[in-house]
Image (cartoon, helix red, strand yellow):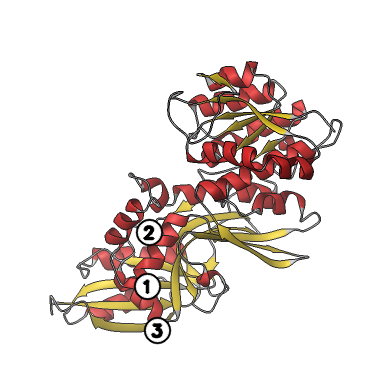
C-alpha cells in the first residue's frame, strides 16, 4: 500500500470540523477506495481551545495557516478560511509554491485569483481542486473538467444560491413577503446575519464566473457580469408570474454568442412545467448544454456543512488516488496560460421577452403614454393587463406588460421614459422571461 496521504486543514468551522470528522469516521472505507490511508496531520484555526466535537490532539496545531502551508509535514493543504485576500490567498499561494496539492471551497478566492493560482499549480505539477466552491455537493466541476471531453459547451445556467431559492420558494408557497422569508431563513441558518452577498447576486456571480471559465476556456471575469438580486421581488411579482404560467428563480446564465460570452445573474421567470422550476428550497441545479451531449441537469444540496464537506473529501480522495508522474487535468479544463481573454458579448435581443410591472396613477392618458414609450423603442407587446394595485387605494393601478423578443437596452430605455413622464407611483419591475428553461 502507498504511503498515507497527509492532510492539513486550515479553518475549523462547520465545514472544516465536518471534513475532519468524516475523514476519521470513514477512514477504513476511504483507505479501501483510495488504496492508501488519509490522515489529518496538521490543523489551523483562530481558537485552539474551542470545542469542535472532534479530538484533533494528534494533529500539529498552527496559529498561522501560511506557516502551516509552508512548513507542515503535509501533502494536501485544505483551505476553508474564506475570503478573497488575507490568510486564504496567502496560504493557498504558499502551499502551491511549496509543491503541495490544494483543496478549497473558496469561490471568492477563485473568482478573483483563480487563474494566477492555477498557473502556479500547473507549473509545480500539483492539483488545485475546488468542487465545493460551486453548487456544494453537486459534482459539477468534475463533470465539466473531466467527464465532458470533446463536448463544446454552448450554455451553462442554473440555480447557484440556496438562500435565494429558499426565499423565493417560500414566498410562492406561503404568500409571505420577502422580508419575512429572509428573517426566517436567517433564523434557520440558511442566510447570514448580513445576507447582502447572497440576495444581491454576488455569490451566484462568483460561482458563475468559474463555470464560465470551465465552459468556454476564458479567463475568469467575475467583475464583468450583469447582476441583479432578489430584494425587489414582491408578492405582486410572484402572483403575476403564477397567473402567466411562470415561476421566479434567481439564475446565473453564461452562453456563447457570435460576439463573445454573455454572463448574467438576475431573477428570471421560467415556465412552471420546466425542470428548473421544480428545484425548490435550498437545493441547487446546474444545466449544461453541449453539441454532443445535449442538455445535462445536475441537482442536489448546494450548501451546508455536510454537502460542502462531501465535495471537499471527494477532492482529497482524488488526490489520494493519483500517483507520482500522472499528468493532472488543467485546473480550469485548459492550461491556465492558454485561457483566452474574456470577451463580453454585444447586447442582443432576448428571445424570451420581458415581464414589466408598473404601478401607475389611475388617470386618463396613462395607457396611451405607456404604449407610446414602448412603440418608440420598437417593443412589441404580447399582452397587457390592468389590475387594481391594492385595496388600500383606488388612485393607482398595476399594469403588467409581457413583451415579445427585444433587447435589455430597449426595455430599460422605455421604462426610464415612463418614469420621467411622471406616471409611476412606485419603482418599476423588470424581469426576463426564459421560455427555454
Question: Visible in this render: residue 342?
Answer: no
Using a 10 Å C-alpha cutoff, classify the residue at mark 1 as few (fewer than 14 neighbours), some (14 to 19) or many (20 or more): few
Q: CA distance from mark 2 to mark 3?
A: 24 Å
Q: Which residue does the numbered mark 2 point to in the structure image? A: 230
Using a 10 Å C-alpha cutoff, classify the residue at mark 2 as few (fewer than 14 neighbours), some (14 to 19) or many (20 or more): many
Q: Earlier in the sequence, mark 2 or mark 1?
A: 1
Quarter of the view holding residue 285: bottom right
Between label 1 and label 3, give the one nearer the viewer: 1
Quarter of the view holding residue 97: top right
Residue 173 is tagged as 1
Q: Residue at 35% across / 83% down in the picture?
A: 384
Closest to the observer, 27 or 73: 27
Q: Secondary structure at mark 3?
A: strand
Q: Earlier in the sequence, mark 2 or mark 3?
A: 2
Task: Give the position of the N terminus as an image quadrant.
Answer: top right
Q: Residue at 64% across / 18% down in the picture?
A: 72
Q: Earlier in the sequence, mark 1 or mark 3?
A: 1
Q: Residue at 75% across / 65% down in the picture?
A: 291
Between label 2 and label 1, give the one nearer the viewer: 1
Is the residue under label 3 in contact with that under label 1 (CB below 8 Å)? no
Q: Secondary structure at mark 2?
A: loop
Residue 383 is tagged as 3
Q: Position of residue 272 (x, y in %)?
A: 49, 77
Q: Secondary structure at mark 1?
A: helix
Is the residue under label 3 in contact with that under label 2 (CB below 8 Å)? no
Q: Is residue 271 above or below residue 334?
A: below
Q: CA distance from mark 1 to mark 3?
A: 26 Å
Q: Position of residue 346 (x, y in %)?
A: 56, 56
Amino acid at each position: 500500500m502507498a504511503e498515507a496521504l497527509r492532510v492539513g486543514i486550515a479553518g475549523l468551522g462547520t465545514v472544516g470540523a465536518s471534513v475532519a470528522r468524516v475523514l476519521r469516521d470513514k477512514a477504513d472505507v476511504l483507505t479501501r477506495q483510495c488504496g492508501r490511508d488519509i490522515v489529518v496531520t496538521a490543523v489551523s484555526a483562530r481558537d485552539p481551545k474551542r470545542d469542535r466535537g472532534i479530538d484533533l490532539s494528534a494533529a500539529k496545531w498552527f496559529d498561522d495557516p501560511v506557516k502551516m502551508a509552508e512548513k507542515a509535514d503535509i501533502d494536501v493543504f485544505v483551505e476553508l478560511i474564506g475570503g478573497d485576500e488575507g490568510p486564504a490567498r496567502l496560504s493557498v499561494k504558499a502551499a502551491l509554491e511549496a509543491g503541495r496539492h490544494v483543496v478549497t471551497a473558496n469561490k471568492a478566492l477563485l473568482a478573483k485569483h483563480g487563474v494566477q493560482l492555477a498557473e502556479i499549480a500547473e507549473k509545480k505539477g500539483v492539483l488545485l481542486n475546488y468542487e465545493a466552491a460551486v453548487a456544494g455537493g453537486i459534482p459539477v466541476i468534475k463533470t465539466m473538467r473531466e467527464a465532458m471531453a470533446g463536448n463544446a459547451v454552448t450554455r451553462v445556467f442554473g440555480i447557484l444560491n440556496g438562500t435565494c431559492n429558499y426565499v423565493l420558494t417560500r414566498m410562492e408557497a406561503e404568500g409571505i413577503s420577502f422580508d419575512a422569508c429572509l428573517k426566517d431563513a436567517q433564523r434557520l441558518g440558511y442566510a447570514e446575519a448580513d445576507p447582502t452577498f447572497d440576495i444581491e447576486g454576488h455569490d451566484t456571480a462568483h460561482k458563475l464566473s468559474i463555470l464560465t471559465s470551465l465552459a468556454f476556456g476564458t479567463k475568469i471575469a467575475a467583475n464583468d457580469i450583469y447582476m441583479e438580486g432578489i430584494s425587489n421581488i414582491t408578492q405582486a411579482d410572484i402572483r403575476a408570474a403564477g397567473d402567466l404560467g411562470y415561476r421566479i428563480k434567481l439564475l446565473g446564465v453564461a452562453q456563447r454568442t457570435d460576439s463573445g460570452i454573455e454572463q448574467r445573474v438576475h431573477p428570471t421567470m421560467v415556465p412552471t412545467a420546466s425542470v428548473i422550476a421544480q428545484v425548490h428550497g435550498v437545493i441547487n441545479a446546474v444545466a449544461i448544454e453541449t453539441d454532443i451531449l445535449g442538455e445535462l441537469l445536475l441537482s442536489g444540496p448546494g450548501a451546508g456543512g455536510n454537502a460542502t464537506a462531501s465535495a471537499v473529501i471527494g477532492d482529497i480522495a482524488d488526490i489520494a488516488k493519483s500517483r507520482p508522474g500522472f499528468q493532472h487535468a488543467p485546473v480550469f479544463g485548459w492550461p491556465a496560460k492558454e485561457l483566452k481573454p474574456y470577451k463580453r458579448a454585444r447586447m442582443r435581443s432576448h428571445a424570451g421577452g420581458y415581464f414589466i410591472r408598473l404601478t401607475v396613477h389611475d388617470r386618463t392618458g396613462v395607457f396611451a403614454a405607456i404604449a407610446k414609450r414602448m412603440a418608440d423603442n420598437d417593443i412589441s407587446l404580447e399582452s397587457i393587463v390592468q389590475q387594481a394595485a391594492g385595496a388600500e387605494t383606488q388612485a393607482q393601478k398595476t399594469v403588467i406588460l409581457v413583451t415579445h423578443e427585444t433587447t435589455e437596452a430597449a426595455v430599460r430605455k422605455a421604462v426610464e421614459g415612463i418614469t420621467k413622464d411622471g406616471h409611476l407611483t412606485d419603482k418599476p419591475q423588470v424581469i426576463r422571461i426564459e421560455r427555454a428553461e
